Image (cartoon, rainbow, N blue to C red):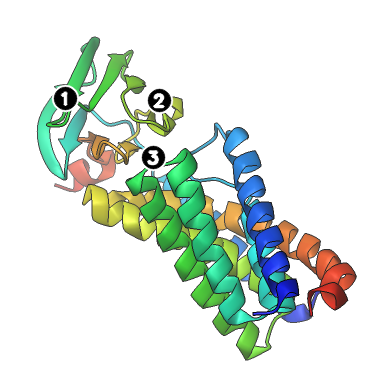
Amino acid sequence: MVKKNDLILIGVILIIGIGALLFMYLNNEAGSKVSVQMNGEEIITFDLDEDITYTIEGDNGAWNTFTIKDGHVDMIDASCPDKICVNHKDIHYDHETITCLPNQVLLEIIGGEENPIDSIAN
Amino acid sequence: MKTKNIAIYGLLVALAFILSYIEYLIPFPLMPGIKLGLANLVVITAMYGLGYKESLVLSIIRILLVGFTFGNLSTMLYSLAGGMLSWIMMAITKKSKWFSLVGVSVIGGVFHNIGQIIVAILIVSNPLIVTYLPLLLVTGVVTGALIGLLASMIIKRVNRHLR
């Protein structure tokens, strides 16, 4: 029923996926800012070391509320129907994102610290 | 169209619809987009038991029904992108005869996720969303393999009733 080719296929995709996950995990570094984007445009940025609650509102009454606490950004409520962004875990690593697809809102961690070895080399 | 076929289509659409609803009830807190792909069970069974065209029609009807009932235009767009890319890749994979039903289902699961990621990147216009892909590849393989195993058991038992 299961052919050898099936197992090879499963193995290859698993290796690619897990390899990429490992690579991303090893290259994690904390970011310093969060960029708030709507419809692909940056609306505002916040430093991660300030604790705030902010609500971003769209044209058609759509809104998303998020907090920054102890350097972690978390979506706490939103007007979207699926609430996937609200259930998303909080983020604080460079390039991590929380996306609310229905409202086209994206929170992105930016400004990761420079690699210390690079700074020495400079 | 024979009466028997009409009945079978109705049955399969209803089944796919109910499976989508069950899936809608089970949230996966780990990350958005991780799903079992229960509805693909019906699509892949139809592809093997009825034919390519028939499974495509089933898949589109299911996505429209589920979209109108539980979702909105944007969720429907995602389902459609995932569903269509998944169907195309499964059809190609099945035609190639390199893999069994399990391999075809794995391809279906993985490309369903890839299709949704592509639409997400286009809608939010931020290519960083691609960082979701590695985890979705892994979960797509696991769920695809499970659905494939289940589907081959189902096909073995119901195939003669479908034709």
Q: Quadrant of residue B105?
A: bottom right
The residue carrying mark 3 is A28
Task: Tell me which amino acid carries mark 3.
Answer: Asn
Q: Residues within 10 Å of mark 2 (few under 14, many from 20)?
A: many
Q: Which numbered marker is on residue B126?
A: none
Residue assigned mark 2: A86
Distance Cα–Cα, label 2 vs label 3: 23 Å
Residue pictured at 24% horizontal, 12% vertical: A53
Q: Picture quarter containing residue A116?
A: top left
B130 vs B100, left or right, is left
Q: Judging from the image, what secondary structure is the residue with disc 3 in?
A: loop
Q: Is residue B108 left or right of residue A35?
A: right
Residue B163, quarter of picture: bottom right
Q: Is residue B27 above or below residue A70?
A: below
Q: Above or below — where is B39 with respect to B23? A: below
Image x and y of residue A51, in percent: 24, 10
- Tell me the distance, in whole angstroms, between the alpha carbons under discs 3 and 1: 31 Å
Residue type at the position of mark 1: Glu
The reply to whether dot 1 and dot 2 touch (C-beta < 8 Å) is no
Q: Position of residue A100 (x, y in %)?
A: 32, 36
Question: A68 and B27: which one is in front?
Answer: B27
Pointer 1 residue: A57
Mark 2 vs mark 3: tell me if same chain: yes
Residue positioned most to the front: B3
Identity of the residue drawn at 25% across and 56% down: B122
